[in-house]
Image (cartoon, rainbow, N blue to C red):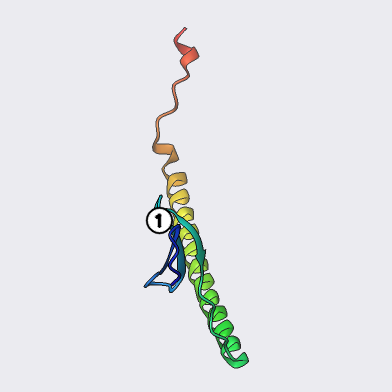
Amino acid sequence: MRKDKKNLEVRCPCCDAILTVDTSSGEIMFTEKPRKKGLSFEDAISGLQREKETADDRFRDAFEKESTRLKSIEGKFQEALKRKDELDDAVNPLDFD
């Protein structure tokens, strides 16, 4: 850490970023994020493969959810069509004249 009267450098315990704080106002002036460690090519490929699989799973789940929702809506619509004769005819407000 640099000892400067105007700025104070603090390391974040969560993300290891270095925050430059103005001592007079207490505002964060600059944030320096830590550099990521280099991954091997195989690690990067396997990470991408895992992300692809989870994305496929999420898409499949969303598709199934949407399909069941559409079936539910269709069932409600068919039920409403069966009951349309049970409803009273709408009253035309112009008939009261």
In this rendering, the answer to whether 1 lies above or below 79 is: below
Q: Can you tell which quarter of the image residue 15 is in?
A: bottom left
Q: Secondary structure at mark 1?
A: loop
Whole-percent x and y of residue 19? Answer: 45, 65
Quadrant of the snapshot with the N terminus: bottom left
**Residue at x-position 57% and y-position 86%:** 38
Nearest the camera: 10 or 79? 10
In this rendering, the answer to whether 8 lies above or below 92 is: below
Q: Name the residue carrying label 1.
A: 23
Number of marks present in the image shown: 1
Q: Amino acid at mark 1?
A: Thr
Nearest the camera: 96 or 7? 7
**Residue at x-position 50% and y-position 13%:** 94
Whole-percent x and y of residue 81? Answer: 47, 45
Task: Find the residue positioned furthest to the left.
Answer: 13
Would residue 52 appear left or right of 19 to someone viewing this image?
right
Local crowd size for mark 1, using a 10 Å CA cut-off: few (<14), some (14–19), many (≥20): some
Whole-percent x and y of residue 13? Answer: 37, 72
Whole-percent x and y of residue 58? Answer: 50, 72
**Residue at x-position 60% and y-position 92%:** 42
Nearest the camera: 55 or 88? 55
Task: Find the residue positioned furthest to the right.
Answer: 41
In this rendering, the answer to whether 1 lies above or below 28 is: below
